[in-house]
Image (tube, rainbow, N blue to C red):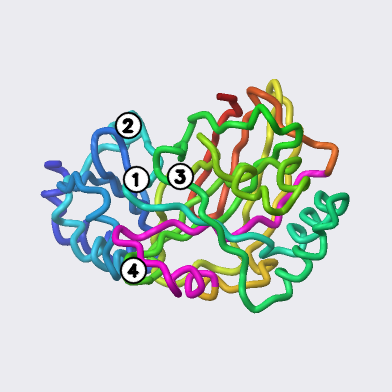
C-alpha cells in the first residue's frame, strides 16, 4: 500500500493506460469482489455482486475509479476462493450456432427423425435460445459438474458466454460449460430441457472479462479433457467460425424478456467430441478462452 502511495500519479497513469487498451477481470470471491488489471490486483468496497456488475459502461466505470479500490498483493488474491461469477442472474444458452454443432445434433437425432430440425434452425433467421440454469445449478471453478444417471452419452460444451446488463448492453465475457446429455436430446428434440437443465449442469468462470471493444472474432476457445491424468480429448476453434453474431443472439433473447439483474448467455459450441466419446466420472474438463482464462471442473454425479 505504501509503495503505491509513494509512486502516486505515475502508478495510476500507467494503470489507466493499461485499462484503456487491455482487459479488466472481475472476480467474485468468497471474501468479496476483486479486480485484476495486468499485474495489479484490487479489492472493491462493494459486497453487492448484482449491483456492481449490472451497470452500463462497466469497463470505463471500473477503469475510471481504480483509485477508489484497495490495492492487494497478488499472493492475497491467489489465496482467495473464486466463485462462479453469478448472483441473481439467469443463464440462457444458444444452440446450433456453429456448423459442427449442427452436424452433431443431426447425427444424434437422426434415428428419431429429428435431424431436419437442426438443419433448419442453423439456416433460419431466428436462433435457437433456451433457458439453462439459475445460480443454484451453476458450478464455479474447480467445482463438480454433473452427468445424469439416466443418460449414457454425455459431453461438455465449451462456450463463450456473454454477460448482458439489464438494459441489454453486452458488458463482459466469461467461460461457460454447457453440460449436455446427447442420448436424451437425440432420443427426441422435445427432451431438450431434460438434456440441458439439471443440478450442476452448467459452469461459469473464472471471471467476467471486460474489454474496451467487442471481443475479437479471432479469439480461440480450447478444451482439454483428462481421464486419470491422460488427455482423452482436446480441440480448439475460433469465434469467427460462429455463424451468428453476438448482438443478434442478444437481440432475440431480449425481444420479450426482461432481466432485472442482467443475464448470462452462452453462445453455442463449435467443439463436439466424436460420437464414440462420453464423459466418465472424475474426468477433468479444462476450457480456456484467450483473454479470459481457464475454467476447470471435475465430472461428478448426483
Which residue shows up at 41% across the image and 56% down it? 209
Q: Residue 143, relative to residue 33: is it above or below?
A: above
Label 3 and label 4: CA atoms lie apart by: 23 Å
- Label 2, on which residue? 80
First of labels 1, 2 by sequence position: 1
Which residue shows up at 70% across the image and 26% down it? 280
Nearer to us: label 4 or label 2: 2
First of labels 1, 3 by sequence position: 1
- Looking at the picture, how far across and down is residue 117, in whole percent? 76, 64
- Looking at the picture, how far across and down is residue 286, in whole percent? 60, 38
- Looking at the picture, how far across and down is residue 23, in whole percent? 40, 59
- Label 4, on which residue? 20
Nearer to us: label 3 or label 4: 3
Label 3 and label 2: CA atoms lie apart by: 14 Å
Residue 14 visible within the image = no
- Label 1, on which residue? 27
Label 4 and label 1: CA atoms lie apart by: 19 Å
Residue 205's disc number: 3
Residue 8 quadrant: bottom left
Q: Residue 297, relative to residue 34: is it above or below?
A: above
Amino acid at each position: 500500500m505504501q509503495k503505491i502511495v509513494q509512486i502516486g500519479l505515475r502508478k495510476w497513469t500507467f494503470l489507466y493506460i493499461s485499462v484503456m487498451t487491455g482487459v479488466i477481470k472481475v472476480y467474485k470471491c468468497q471474501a468479496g469482489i476483486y479486480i485484476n488489471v495486468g499485474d495489479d490486483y484490487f479489492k472493491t468496497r462493494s459486497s453487492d455482486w448484482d449491483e456492481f456488475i449490472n451497470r452500463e459502461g462497466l469497463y470505463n466505470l471500473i477503469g475510471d475509479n481504480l483509485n477508489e479500490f484497495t490495492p492487494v498483493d497478488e499472493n492475497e488474491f491467489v489465496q482467495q476462493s473464486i466463485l462462479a461469477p453469478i448472483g441473481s442472474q439467469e443463464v440462457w444458452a444458444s444452440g446450433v450456432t456453429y456448423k459442427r454443432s449442427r452436424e452433431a445434433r443431426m447425427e444424434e437425432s437422426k434415428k428419431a427423425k429429428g435431424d431436419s430440425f437442426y438443419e433448419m434452425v442453423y439456416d433460419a433467421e431466428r436462433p435457437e435460445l433456451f433457458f439453462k440454469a439459475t445460480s443454484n445449478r451453476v458450478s464455479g471453478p474447480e467445482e463438480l459438474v454433473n452427468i445424469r444417471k439416466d443418460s449414457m452419452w454425455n459431453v461438455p460444451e465449451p462456450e463463450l458466454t456473454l454477460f448482458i446488463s439489464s438494459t441489454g448492453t453486452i458488458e463482459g465475457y466469461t467461460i461457460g460449460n454447457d453440460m449436455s446429455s446427447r442420448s436424451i436430446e437425440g432420443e427426441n428434440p422435445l427432451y431438450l430441457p431434460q438434456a440441458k437443465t439439471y443440478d450442476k449442469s452448467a459452469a461459469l468462470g473464472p471471471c467476467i472479462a471486460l474489454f474496451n471493444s467487442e471481443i475479437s472474432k479471432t479469439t480461440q476457445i480450447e478444451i482439454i479433457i483428462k481421464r486419470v491424468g491422460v488427455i482423452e480429448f482436446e480441440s480448439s476453434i475460433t469465434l469467427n467460425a460462429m455463424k451468428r453474431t453476438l448482438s443478434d443472439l442478444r437481440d432475440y433473447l431480449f425481444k420479450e424478456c426482461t432481466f432485472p439483474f442482467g443475464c448470462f448467455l452462452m453462445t453455442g459450441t463449435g467443439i463436439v467430441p466424436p460420437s464414440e466419446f462420453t464423459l466418465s466420472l472424475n474426468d477433468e474438463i479444462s476450457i480456456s478462452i484467450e483473454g479470459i482464462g481457464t475454467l476447470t471442473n471435475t465430472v461428478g454425479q448426483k
